[in-house]
């Protein structure tokens, strides 16, 4: 995360959440990196744009779910020390291989799944950033992960997040949000999705399956290139949403008039 992501008050915070698979922190698509370069496959342009717009940034790492093995030499030394007979050595070697295989499946604490990782980062980092207006930019399975967080931390997310940009998302509103009227009303006003489509960027692209909130074209038919092709449009959406939120907050501030001052003084 950026240096003052949790400490600088009254500034916007952007959270980046990628698709599932082999993608690590800072990546939208490894294939896009290989074939089209870092400008299209990495989150670097997005981070640079966010920092230039005075956002703080948190980059998630939802696909790194298992503990790395320690070196084979260390484990083998523990298991084969003081071995005398060949038969015993064979048993120990088999035990080592079995242990090595099981260790590859040890989940990381509080990050066993992308959903668990997201909930942990929310609870111990994002939710503790006071005075922040939070925006999410999510790709693919990241959309499903965000909706899972919205259900888990309903009131916190609804009060803290002002905009969510989904890119070719795998969420399912019916299965995840059900018939919760409050959640359905919230996503209608706070979410927008960019989907792969032959239509030009930002042209309406709603389908029968996706009509819970505004859906527009990402300007490309390639899933891996959707984040980079829609990036400029997404930041325009964030700026507009933040400005609208500020206008709403301002309208709720009571206006002091002469008559109200006189009433207070007489009381």
Image (cartoon, helix red, strand yellow):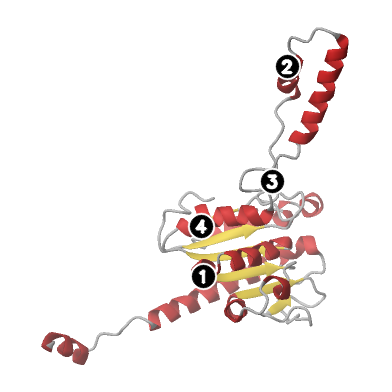
- For the C terminus, the quadrant is bottom left
Secondary structure of residue under mark 1? helix
At label 4, counting other C-alpha atoms closer than 10 Å, the crowd grade (few under 14, some 14-19, many 20 or more) is many
Residue 37 position within the rendered picture, expressed as x and y whole percent measured from the top left = 75, 52
Q: Earlier in the sequence, mark 3 or mark 4?
A: 3
- Please name whichever residue, 94 or 150, is drawn nearer the observer in this view of the structure: 94
* Label ID, residue 155: 1
Residue corresponding to mark 4: 126
- First reached walking from the N terminus: tag 1 or tag 4: 4
Tell me which label, 3 or 2, sits earlier in the chain. Answer: 3
| Image coords of residue 20 (percent x, y) | 74, 55
How far is the residue under mark 3 from the one under mark 2? 28 Å
Q: Please report contact status of discs 2 and 1: CB closer than 8 Å, yes or no.
A: no
Residue marked by disc 2 = 77
Please rate how many residues cluster around mark 2, counting C-alpha atoms within 10 Å: few if below 14, some from 14 to 19, many from 20.
few
| Secondary structure found at label 4 | helix
Q: CA distance from mark 2 to mark 1?
A: 52 Å
Q: Which residue is mark 3?
A: 64
Tag nearer the camera, 3 or 1: 1
């Amino acid at each position: 995360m950026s240096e003052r992501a949790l400490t600088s008050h009254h500034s916007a915070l952007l959270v980046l959440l990628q698709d599932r698979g082999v993608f690590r922190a800072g990546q939208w698509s490894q294939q896009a990196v290989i074939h089209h370069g870092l400008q299209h496959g990495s989150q670097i342009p997005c981070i640079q744009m966010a920092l230039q717009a005075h956002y703080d940034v948190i980059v998630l790492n939802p696909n790194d779910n298992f503990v790395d093995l320690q070196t084979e030499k260390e484990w083998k030394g523990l298991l084969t020390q003081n071995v005398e007979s060949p038969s015993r050595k064979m048993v120990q070697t088999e035990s080592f291989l079995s242990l090595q295989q099981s260790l590859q499946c040890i989940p990381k604490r509080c990050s066993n799944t992308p959903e668990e990782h997201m909930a942990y980062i929310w609870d111990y980092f994002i939710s503790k950033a006071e005075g922040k207006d939070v925006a999410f930019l999510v790709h693919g399975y990241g959309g499903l992960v965000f909706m899972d967080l919205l259900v888990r931390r309903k009131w916190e997310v609804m009060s803290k997040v002002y905009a969510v940009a989904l890119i070719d998302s795998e969420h399912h509103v019916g299965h995840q949000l059900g018939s919760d009227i409050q959640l359905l009303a919230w996503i209608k006003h706070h979410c927008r999705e960019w989907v792969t489509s032959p239509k030009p960027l930002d042209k309406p692209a709603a389908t029968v399956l996706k009509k819970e909130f505004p859906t527009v074209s990402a300007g490309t038919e390639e899933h891996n290139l959707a984040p980079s092709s829609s990036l400029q449009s997404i930041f325009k959406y964030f700026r507009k949403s933040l400005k609208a939120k500020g206008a709403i907050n301002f309208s709720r501030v009571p206006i002091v008039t002469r008559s109200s001052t006189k009433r207070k003084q007489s009381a």
